[in-house]
Image (tube, grey):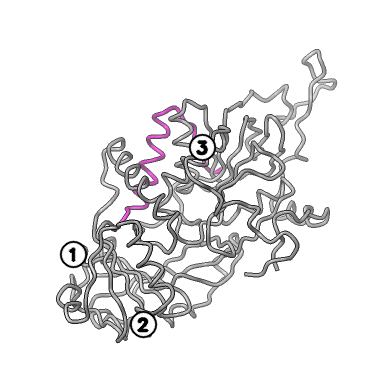
Amino acid sequence: MLIPYYFPIKANEKARIAEQSPRPFNGRIKQLPASGRCRVNCQSKLCVAHMPPEDFDCVVIGAGVQGCFTAYHLAKNGKRTLLLEQFVLPHSRGSSHGQTRIIRKAYEHDFYTHMMAECYQLWAQLEKEAGVQLYRRTGLLLMGPEKGRDFQLFRDTMERNAIPTVTLAPGEFGRHIPHVNRSPGDGAIVDTTAGVLYADRALRAVQEVFRRLGGVIKDGEKVTDVQPGSPVAVTTASGTYRAKSLVITAGPWANTLLSHTELQLPLQVVKINVCYWREKTPGTYAVRNRFPCFLHVDVAEHHIYGLPSNEYPGLVKVCYHMGSETDPDERDRQTDRGDIDVLSRYIARHFPGLVPTPAVVESCMYTLTPDHHFVLDCHPSHRNIVIGAGFSGHGFKFGPVVGKVLCELALGRVPSYDLSPFKIQRFPPHSKSAL
């Protein structure tokens, strides 16, 4: 059971959370008398008399793709911005690592497709600023039962928004997409604008441009306390930082941080097995041979997606779009491989050119909301605390636009998009939610 967003955190629950994240002090900055001197001859580094002021326009917690782009946009707006990350960069403990992600306009909902138009522009802008390729166009093959609900939602959204597509009839499917077995009754549509984002490269690029703009990144600094107010105070083992506004983009650790602000969101963290499958004949599904990314809907309880062989020569990434619930600090203890069994059967049926046993299994985490839509909103009690959370395994491609709207919220501006699908208030007000 999950605590809904408005549900108050009990004192004993706050104590339990505090025990899990040892604090260097009691969360209160020692105040000075009017003289500016301590009343006692203390040597505490946590007393403001002995601590240099660290004031920023905004602090962003979490240096995944959403936090990095939020900090980048804030710096572009001339704001002194601090980006905090609990792990030493780069790392593979969150949701933004790995070499590749899919970028696509194909979606079930118009509001995502609308946001993606600007995402492509902003990814291209970052490529120019960083002088590095971040995107490779491959197309996205969408497959699924033609009468299935999800397939129809994708198809209708692409038609309404005039997304460039190619529809493959059963008789021509094998000519265009060799070495894939199409199920009887399946439709096949190619989103020709889609492709591969080079994820690790993209994170390095946005961090480098942020630094060039005068931004400050402090990694290896785990946040141990957040004191709402004006200014808001953020404490790590290294000290306390104050800012006019705070943006929390902490992925699987969002609720841990929000507990300091008397807020919990209905978020579920799951561990994903990221699987790579060996080609029987190298190059069969290679990006250089124009094999597309793909998304197969209504084929299992959750979608199955894949990317052509690229980062690991001779290996194709094919993943199940769901995992098993986990504690983000103990994710290695989660060893469920049920999703791998589903994938092995799928590979054997649909991809005859792959060995149906994974050659490499890596891990990632999703942070899910009940409806799998993002949370992009201000804290209901503290308007200078902005929250970006619950990206539900499909948020990386949206990083440039998510960062833009979180920046706008942090600056008190009207956001560029209708954020009603992403509001905290959409969660049920009087019942506990279970995912």
Q: Position of residue 357 (x, y in %)?
A: 35, 81
Q: Is residue 200 left or right of residue 406?
A: left
Residue at 38%, 62% in the rendered image: 157
Label 1 packing within 10 angstroms: few (<14), some (14-19), many (20+): some
- Residue in front for this viewpoint, 99 or 173: 173
Query: Magenta segment, which residues?
Result: 194-220
Q: Which numbered marker is on residue 127? A: none
Quarter placement of the C terminus? bottom right
Residue at 74%, 51% in the rendered image: 18
Q: Position of residue 337 (x, y in %)?
A: 49, 78
Q: Which residue is mark 2?
A: 346
Q: Earlier in the sequence, mark 2 or mark 3?
A: 2
Q: Position of residue 254 (x, y in %)?
A: 61, 52
Is 327 above or below relative to 28?
below
Q: Is residue 55 left or right of residue 215?
A: right
Q: Secondary structure at mark 3?
A: helix
Between marks 2 and 3 in the image, the one whose residue lies nearer the viewer = 3
Q: Is residue 207 left or right of residue 186?
A: right
Residue 189 belongs to magenta span = no
Is 208 above or below relative to 135?
above
Label 2 packing within 10 angstroms: few (<14), some (14-19), many (20+): some
Hey, what amino acid is under mark 2? Tyr
Q: Which residue is mark 3?
A: 407
Residue at 29%, 41% in the rendered image: 127
